[in-house]
Image (cartoon, rainbow, N blue to C red):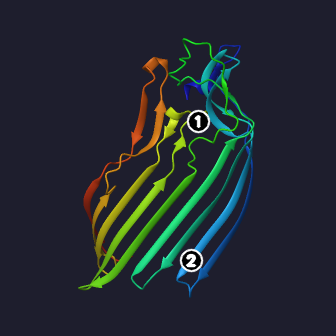
Amino acid sequence: IADARLVNDSGELVPYSYDGEEVLSLEIGYKASLWEDTLRMSTAIYRYDYKGYQDQEFVFNELQGVYADLPTNTGDARNDGFEIESTFLATQNLTLNLSYSYADTAYQTGLLVQDIANFETPFDLFVTPPKSTKGQPLKGIPKHKGTFYGDYTFDWRELIVSIFFSHNYTDSYSSRSLGAYFDQVPAKHRTDVALIFAQPDESVRLRFFIDNLFDQTNFYGVSAGGVNNNFRLTGNLIDKRRVGVDFIFRFGEG
């Protein structure tokens, strides 16, 4: 990162430095096998307390006297949440799996960050004070995430046939620490299905699949620009619907 370099008093280019991060991790969990081992569950409740939370922000660089996008310490932060995953062997042929996670995060101390991507008050035109990140959720972390999948497998003409279905949901989250509405990565859904034919030893395997069955328009990141690119909002798209076939043939054993 070019901004992570500084020029010292001698005119030399030296690495930009920042302090280390400390985290206190507390977790309590429960794991069990129930109903004659047909239901397996794993749960955990956790809390992460950060001191000197490391992040990358548009902050004032005192040595250069300008605002720059720099890795820095943002002070105290926390991440509280819980996770649960369960696998249910519903029948000899049908397997179901469900996982869910919840995260409640916040910058606690707060850091003064210049909001260069705010098109309502362009940084080059208005004298706008930096904003504090205090109380904002940690960027890049969705509050809710969940996945459900099912697999139905049966024998057919000396082959093993599997019908697979999965659905994934990821809640919206902010791509920057100030949490503005134009920095939000939209919530997304994705459904995948597949039909698989395989020999019992997996030496031959044929899979027909449809990824993103309902052709959802999903993003895994957004970026709000500044005055230099007319505050253009860009996003990184996840694949649109994809239909395909793959074939695996294994030579030899193992």
Q: Nearer the viewer, residue 201 or 165?
A: 165
The answer to whether 191 is drawn above or below residue 163 in the figure is: above
- The image position of residue 132, as x and y in percent, is 68, 29
- The image position of residue 104, as x and y in percent, is 65, 50
- Answer yes or no: do the residues labelled 2 and 1 have beta carbons within 8 Å? no
Sooner in the amino-acid sequence: mark 2 or mark 1? 2
Residue drawn at (71%, 52%) of the image: 48
- The image position of residue 55, as x and y in percent, is 64, 37
Secondary structure under badge 2?
Answer: strand
- Residue behind mark 2: 40
> Identity of the amino acid at label 1?
Gly
Q: Quadrant of the C terminus?
A: bottom left
Secondary structure under badge 1?
Answer: loop
The answer to whether 64 is drawn above or below residue 162 in the figure is: above
183 with respect to 31 (left or right): left
How many numbered marks does the figure carry?
Answer: 2
Name which quarter of the figure residue 165 lies in: bottom left
Q: Quadrant of the N terminus?
A: top right
Distance in Å between CA atoms under marks 2 and 1: 38 Å
132 with respect to 237 (left or right): right
> Identity of the amino acid at label 2?
Arg
- The image position of residue 53, as x and y in percent, is 70, 40
- Residue behind mark 1: 179
Return the mark for residue 254.
Answer: none
The answer to whether 228 is drawn above or below residue 207 in the figure is: above
Instruction: Tell which tag, 2 or 1, sits nearer the viewer.
Output: 1
34 with respect to 107 (left or right): left
The answer to whether 76 is drawn above or below residue 95 in the figure is: above
Q: Nearer the viewer, residue 11 or 239?
A: 239
Residue drawn at (63%, 42%) of the image: 137
Q: Residues within 10 Å of mark 1 (few under 14, many from 20)?
A: some
Q: Residues within 10 Å of mark 2 (few under 14, many from 20)?
A: some
